Image (cartoon, coloured by chain):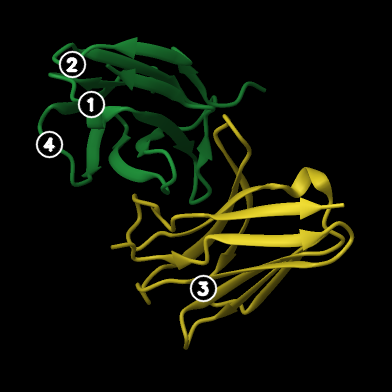
């Protein structure tokens, strides 16, 4: 059974550009969450979606948005990229209260 | 600052036991988690404990919970070189968001 898959694994953007990150949850998992992990820190919560509805949002600016599709996959969008957006973006899916994480998408903003 | 606090580094000799400590703030957290992150990888769920338990054992891993002091620990018996990683403690103060500590880097020396 496939785990949580994320794409792309690595990408480089320049300031001001836009990025879309994708996540496919474990089959049967209806909840998807996004986290940002800056180098040397723990992951910080960005969003959670359940059954295509936003259930929670962390302390991130409106440049960050997300959505969940009918097949429960999800996209995270970040507009007007800043240097400080450089991080590992992690997606987690869950059926109960034991979230399973993907390997992440490493974003570098130059 | 972090709601979950961990010591940053731990060095242990191969074959010895490792103990990683964590303090959390939200007494309403129903579950507490330990995740492992190897270099360049996502987060691997190691174990979790329900807040009405005070101990959970899973093979080489033992979790102790002192709810009165809001203190959580992870003991790894017979530590191996493959246990070298960053270990994150996390609480779930509501039903959708994981709140992580900054992580403890464990180095296993021969």
Query: What residue is pinned by disc 1?
Result: A83
Across and down, in percent, residue B19 comes to 69, 69
Q: Nearer the viewer, residue A68 or B55?
A: B55
Instruction: Say whether mark 1 and mark 2 are on the same chain.
Output: yes
> Residue at coordinates 63% horizontally, 21% vertically from top-left?
A2
Residue B104: quadrant of the picture: bottom right
Left/right placement of residue B59 relative to residue B107 reads right
Query: What residue is pinned by disc 4?
Result: A61
Give above or below for B36 relative to A101.
below
Hey, which residue is sitting farthest bottom in the picture?
A: B68
Q: Are marks 4 and 1 in contact (CB under 8 Å)?
A: no
- CA–CA distance in space, label 3 to label 1: 39 Å
> Residue at coordinates 21% horizontally, 22% vertically from top-left?
A78
- CA–CA distance in space, label 4 to label 3: 33 Å
Query: What residue is pinned by disc 2?
Result: A15
- CA–CA distance in space, label 4 to label 1: 14 Å
Q: Provide the secondary structure element on which disc 4 rests.
A: loop
> Residue at coordinates 56% horizontally, 73% vertically from top-left?
B72
Category of crowding for the residue at label 4, using alpha-carbon neighbours closer than 10 angstroms: few (below 14), some (14–19), many (at least 20): few
In the rendered picture, chain B carries what hue?
A: yellow
Tag shown at residue B51: 3
In the rendered picture, chain A carries what hue?
A: green
């Amino acid at each position: 059974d496939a785990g949580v898959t994320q794409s792309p694994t690595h990408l480089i953007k320049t300031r001001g550009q836009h990025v879309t990150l994708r996540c496919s949850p474990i089959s049967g998992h209806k909840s998807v969450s996004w986290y940002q992990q800056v180098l040397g820190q723990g992951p910080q919560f960005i969003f959670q979606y359940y059954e295509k509805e936003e259930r929670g949002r962390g302390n991130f600016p409106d440049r960050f948005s997300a959505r969940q599709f009918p097949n429960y996959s999800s996209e995270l969008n970040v507009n007007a990229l800043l240097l400080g957006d450089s991080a590992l973006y992690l997606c987690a899916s869950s059926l109960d209260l034991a979230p399973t994480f993907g390997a992440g998408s490493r974003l570098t903003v130059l | 600052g972090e709601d979950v606090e961990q010591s940053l580094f731990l060095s242990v000799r191969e074959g010895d036991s490792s103990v990683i400590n964590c303090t959390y703030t939200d007494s309403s957290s129903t579950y507490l988690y330990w995740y492992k992150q190897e270099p360049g990888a996502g987060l691997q769920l190691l174990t979790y404990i329900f807040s009405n338990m005070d101990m959970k054992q899973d093979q080489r891993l033992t979790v102790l919970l002192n709810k009165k002091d809001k203190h959580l620990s992870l003991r790894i018996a017979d530590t191996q070189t493959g246990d070298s990683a960053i270990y994150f403690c996390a609480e779930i103060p509501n039903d959708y968001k994981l709140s992580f500590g900054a992580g403890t880097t464990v180095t296993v020396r021969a």
